[in-house]
Image (cartoon, rainbow, N blue to C red):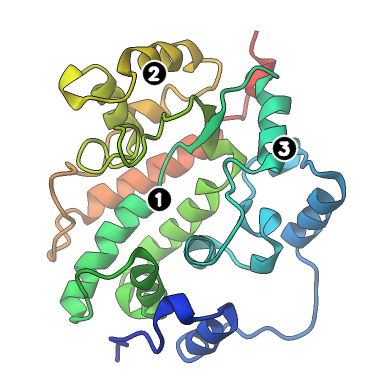
Amino acid sequence: MADKSIPLSFAAMTKEQLDAELRKYDDYNKTGRVYSADEVAALFVKKFGILDMRYNKLTNLIPIINPDLSGESGIRAAILYRIYPSTEIDSCETVRKLYRHYYGNDIPESADTIFNAFTPFLDFCRSREMELGIYKKGRSKNDELALILLNLKYIFYGYGDLKALFDRFFDLMYSFSNLMPVPKYFNGSAYKNGKGTWGLNNDYPSLYYKNLEDEDSKIYKSKEMKQWLDEVMNKYKIMEMYELDPPYPISEYYGHDDKKLNNLVSYIEKAIKLIENRFKQGFPIDTV
């Protein structure tokens, strides 16, 4: 039976308390102590402050930059990263060093995750929560994510293949192959429209690019952002990523009849492939 409540106000819960709750729903206890590849990479980052992207361009950086999340992956890692105090992946100093090394020294001052797996994930989860009778409007972001994590097996009951796709998508979302340095306010802010502004593009790259061509969108410095983006499309190897349309219009929701399931699956599969193939022929600095 799905759990309809969070035992404590999430803001008051420690990682240990949430883990205790999750043990009631997930059989994820581990025995023994074996260092994973991610843990070894994290130790390397801690000691030397840089990671060799020739071998780690598709590695989930969450447990490497945040050793407290060591051993976590997929959906679970992404949610824990969002709800616990964590070092930001795309703009931390370790990743900025990688930007300078693999993009060249002249990099912009901000950063972006190109594909945001949370956008389609949350839309699907909310639809399933409504079906299960556990959707609660007006929750804080952290409480919403915590409740989804607690009920993950119920939300994805009968959708095992989709969950596996989302797990892979989330691992790749926080890999170097889905990151890029960008100008300040590229992603917008509370008072500036940008990539990630809800209702304009919902963080879908293709819609953001269309926003840049539309003066009515009131994207912050739209002409300058478009000019910059056009200049780096080939060097950053992101042109195909910026051509991938959302699984369905952002004015619509997933719904309760699975009519959009095939579109959702197709979108995730294409996004995964684009991330995996992005740096197969080398990094931006290798582009002449």
Dot 1 lies on which element?
loop
The x and y percentages for residue 128 are 23, 71
In the figure, 195 relative to 165: above or below?
above
Q: Is residue 196 above or below residue 120?
A: above
- Taking the image as shown, residue 229 lies to the left or right of residue 156, namely right
Question: Percent x, y for residue 75?
Answer: 47, 63
- Of the numbered discs in the image, which one, if any, rests on residue 53? 3
**Is residue 3 positioned above or below 248 on the image?**
below
Question: In the drawing, does residue 81 fall left or right of residue 223?
Answer: right
Residue picked out by circle 2: 225
Residue 282 visible in the picture: no
Tell me which residue sits at (26%, 36%) in the image: 201
Q: Secondary structure at mark 3?
A: helix
In percent of width and height, residue 112 lies at 49, 36
Residues at circles 1 and 2 in contact by the CB criterion of under 8 Å = no
Name the quadrant containing residue 140: bottom left
| Of pointers 1 and 3, the one earlier in the residue sequence | 3
The residue carrying mark 1 is: 117
Query: Element type at marker 2?
Result: helix
Q: Quadrant of the N terminus?
A: bottom left
Q: CA distance from mark 1 to mark 2?
A: 23 Å
Mark 1 neighbour class, 10 Å CA radius: few under 14, some 14 to 19, many 20 or more: many
Q: Residue furthest right?
A: 47
Classed neighbour count for the residue bearing mark 2: other residues with Cα under 10 Å, few (<14), some (14–19), many (≥20): many
Residue at 79% of width from left, 49% of height from top? 45
Write the residue at 17% across / 75% down: 131
Q: Residue at x 32, y 37 (%)?
A: 204
Instruction: Decide if residue 77 is in sight here.
Output: yes
